[in-house]
Amino acid sequence: MTNNTMTKKNKSKNIRTISVNKILSAAQDEFISQGYQGATVQAIADNAGMPKANVLYYFKNKKNIYHAVLEQTLTMWDEGIGDILPEDGPKLAIEKFVKAKITMSFTNPKASKIYAMEIIQGTQHLQDFTRTYLHQWVQKKAKIFQFWIDKGQMQPIEPVNLIFLIWSSTQHYADFDNQILTIMDRIDYTEDDITHITNFLTDFILRGCGLKQ
Amino acid sequence: MTNNTMTKKNKSKNIRTISVNKILSAAQDEFISQGYQGATVQAIADNAGMPKANVLYYFKNKKNIYHAVLEQTLTMWDEGIGDILPEDGPKLAIEKFVKAKITMSFTNPKASKIYAMEIIQGTQHLQDFTRTYLHQWVQKKAKIFQFWIDKGQMQPIEPVNLIFLIWSSTQHYADFDNQILTIMDRIDYTEDDITHITNFLTDFILRGCGLKQ
DNA sequence: GTCTATATGCTGATAGAC
DNA sequence: GTCTATCAGCATATAGAC
């Protein structure tokens, strides 16, 4: 299908999709650096390369822009959380889980930051997500760890705190990238850095669980 | 010295100290939950129990309030960072370091949150602190770990990433307390929780470093 | 769909009486 | 030192021409 054969509807749908994505991307940056209140629709429009009125045409108001950014964030969180499968056994499962979280941290640090800011500020918009989805996820996965412990496949490591440690140590490279890069004398993470960090965290956590050496 | 024998200067100095502390405490809460821009002088004044004009009498403007809160935060960070001493050897040093960071997280979660938000948002006000003080601190302590590794007192664990892991896993309980408490079905951390978490993290990290079992 | 002009409301900050 | 009243500026959001 060429541009010439496009229906009017398809054309305008494309413009809409492109504009909406530009706005969401600009908004993500703006909300991270300025916070919700500090972010101005004007700044989002400037960074998206369009007049302020257009932004409000697509999203009606600032709150709706933020909700859309949050929704994107949760989708990524959900897709990137990885899984912990009983049939994998503790070693492989932890390796996979750590790798999934690290990958998410390095491929989408902005989503991680938006999420972190929400939780730090008091789970204002994410209370439902935490109370229901996340609560159940942790309980379910903790049971799998307990199953392995009971079968003698791993040492008695407290599962809930283990999950917290894996979350925190992997997210840290996304959320605190400014601090870490400054300390490491880098402008950005290189591929080598990412490989190195992945190996470090995987080895360290497996050893912490008594699953290596 | 009774109130009656107080000089006028002492009295007013007390009022000032009390008012300033009330303002700083209220401001800390407000900056965490609303962000810098979202925080209003009016809300700070309300939570401090005084008229807005009084707040601006003591601090002149909102920026100055925030700077004062940040200064408090850095002082706490500095006092709570703990130390890593060559003469302690790796095991004791790591035990002490982990314990110091956990203690800070549980005794002053608000300072940890203010700090975290600053770094996530791009070290806007803390670039100097990160570039100079923190950079040097990490390099210095990394050398001590390297010294122990070279002497065969501990396994070759990459020191800089080890420091990041200890920071992140301990701070997490302060910064993400809302999420953690929801998942753990608690309103607040109990003394038992804190002991349990301290033991978990200390054991896990020592094992990760190959210094236990 | 795009853009200009404008209304409305809120916030930081000040002036000045007490 | 405390507090009321008020100003000036800015940001969201809308109306309406193109």
Image: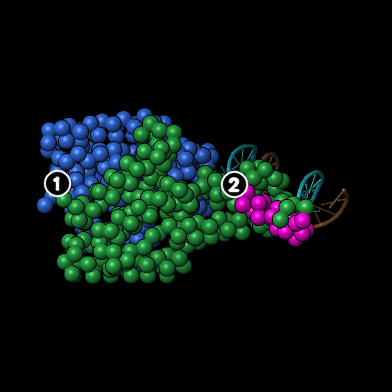
Chain colours: A blue, B green, C brown, D cyan
Mark 2 falls on what kind of element?
Answer: helix
**Which region shows up in magenta?**
B5-23
Q: Residue at x 61, y 59 (%)?
A: B64
Q: Is residue A169 left or right of residue A206?
A: right
Q: Residue at x 37, y 70 (%)?
A: B136
| x and y percentages locating residue A49 in the rendered image | 47, 54
Q: Quadrant of the N terminus of chain A?
A: top left
| Residue B12: in magenta span | yes
Q: Is residue B155 left or right of residue B23?
A: left
Viewer-proximal residue, B4 or C13? Answer: B4
Identity of the amino acid at label 1?
Leu
Identity of the amino acid at label 2?
Ala
| x and y percentages locating residue A75 in the rendered image | 34, 38
Residue B59 falls in which quadrant of the image? bottom right
Residue B138 visible in the picture: yes
The mark found on residue A211 in the picture is 1
Q: Identify the subunit bearing mark 2.
A: B
Viewer-proximal residue, A36 or B62? Answer: B62
The residue under label 2 is B26
| x and y percentages locating residue B175 in the rendered image | 42, 47
Residue A194 falls in which quadrant of the image? bottom left
| x and y percentages locating residue B28 in the rendered image | 55, 49
Viewer-proximal residue, B56 or A185? Answer: B56
Residue B186 falls in which quadrant of the image? top left
Q: Residues within 10 Å of mark 2 (few under 14, many from 20)?
A: some
